[in-house]
Image (cartoon, rainbow, N blue to C red):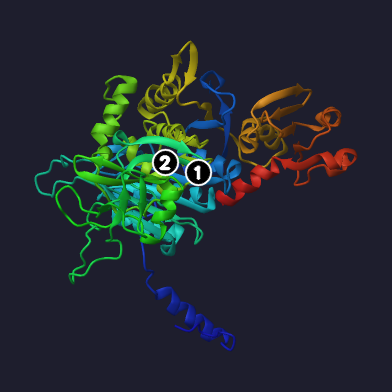
Amino acid sequence: MAKKDYSNFNKEELIEEIKKLEKRKKYGLVWEDKPEKVVEMCKEKLPILEEDRIREIIADTEKPFNILIEGDNYHALSVLNYTHNKKIDAIYIDPPYNTGASDWKYNNKYVNADDAYRHSKWLNFIKNRLTLCKDILKEDGIICVTIDDYELPRLWLLLDDIFGAENFLGNVVIRNNPSGRKTKRKVAQVHEYALFFGKSQNSFIKNISIEMDKKSHVYKKDKNGKWYSPTNLRKQGVDSQALKPDGSFRDRWYPIYYDPKTGKLTTKLELPIKIWPIDAKGEKRIWRRSTDIIDKMYQEGDLWCQETKYGYQVYFKFYGGVEGEPPKSIWYDSKFSASEHGTNILNEILGKREMFPFPKSIFAVEECIKVMTNNKNAIILDFFAGSGTTAQAVLELNKLDGGDRKFILCTNNENNIMTEVCYPRIKKVIQKLEKEQQGKLIKDMPGNLKFFKTNFVDAEPTDRNKEAMVKKSTEMLCLKEECFDELKNGNNFKIFTDNKDKLLGIVYNDSGIEPIKKEITKFNKKFIVYVFSLDDSAREEEFEDVKDLVELKPIPAVILNVYRRIFK
């Protein structure tokens, strides 16, 4: 519909047009606004981070730090809007499902099935957090939210509203409960959902092979990277039939010729053995690759033949996300069972306990991460950390392909979930996989962890509160710049490094300026320097003599500007 031109409307006509527009019904979600205390609190108190050094874990000094934050996830996300703006590759969250079984609180009270505003409270709760997390994602980033039937319709519309319906990337059905949820009136539910949305039109789902069973595949490596073996070149499954509905054959139904003496495989000339893609049951299937690349795959050592009890089989090197197929919308493998690969795995790590019901299958989380990003240095955020499954999934993926992915997990300590489940699990996953082999310590799953807690400073913009913010901002600045090693604790200034080539300076008041300039001159290297200032200036005139060595930023202004935007 063409836009109406209002340029020639007089005042009365414009007023009448506005009245018409006000009467229009909005398409989408409408719910009762229920203020949330942790959100309202930010009008008077501003969140900051404080490090708990006792809970720091260092298993490999060559590896990056992962982050665990204890506190309300709304406050943690507020901090991350400053420290990690547009830095996160993928967000995976498993929020409360709002089943009515008193499984989550709103304003410190459990929300049960009889609450008349149950859905409105849940929508307020989720909207506040989804809105904050959007700016943390990279422009090509993706968010995955798992949910079941209780809130699926409302969540989908909410994600449409926040991320845009045009950025919906798919809804996957995951069979997480093969035995089915027991019920008297309803269908026994055996599945849940994973909704994928992109940050922008630059976001796209990555190729994987979700049918792959890790227990039956060996991970190997060659000059082109790591690959699974063996992977049969013959395709299997509902979309692998050779015959079309009209009775004709599909393009990838063809013979591959094999010479047992030389091992040669080809489609170009006839050799002693002709191999068709026919399975053990005699069903005509198709090959996974077309004829034009078979000879090239053989020449590069990516294709070979092996005689089995089912006859000659053709295998190839499958490079996972590089050559994989688009993930399907139904994931039914037994490895996605929450009880078998969620509860049992958690019990193996921490011992059997009833502290955290229904943890996710670690394989389900891994697959969701692989769908969202193939970056081996990706940052994965989970702000409903629960038992810490996402942390273990990230570490497992790094172990599998040698990646340096990092996780950021956030959770409060309600029912001691952080202190007795999440943190102990992460600690044991890292530490228990250090083992002795031939007298040497082998780190199976190396990783490091920084542990933070949320705290607050007064929000009123007085000089005293600004000074307090600067004094409390050290951990946030170190997290933002990923510089955690303290090189110098001087008089009203500190210097940190990332143990490579990055240098961070923090000046807490005027008397720290001259001393840090002397240190900068000694290093004679580029510094990022955060300088205390009561306004938006970075005291550039004070650093004129070292201006080529510094990138100056005013604090607390750089932090307060972010908070003004998100708490307006």
Where is 282 relative to 454, above or below? below
Picture coordinates of residue 564 (x, y %)? 61, 49
Q: Is residue 402 left or right of residue 214?
A: right
Dot 2, how many residues are within 10 Å of its Cα: few (below 14), some (14-19), or many (20+)?
many
The residue lying at 36 percent from left, 39 percent from top is: 229
Where is 345 relative to 149, above or below? above
Where is 79 relative to 425, above or below? below
Identify residue type, mark 2.
Answer: Trp
The residue lying at 52 percent from left, 32 percent from top is: 67
Q: Is residue 562 left or right of residue 106?
A: right
Picture coordinates of residue 403 (x, y %)? 50, 36
Picture coordinates of residue 459 (x, y %)? 61, 40
Q: Looking at the image, which is closer to me, 490 or 340?
A: 340
Residue that badge 1 annotates: 224
Q: Quadrant of residue 353?
A: top left
Identify residue type, mark 1.
Answer: Asn
The residue lying at 57 percent from left, 49 percent from top is: 86
Residue that badge 2 annotates: 227
Picture coordinates of residue 216 (x, y %)? 29, 35
**Disc marking residue 474:** none
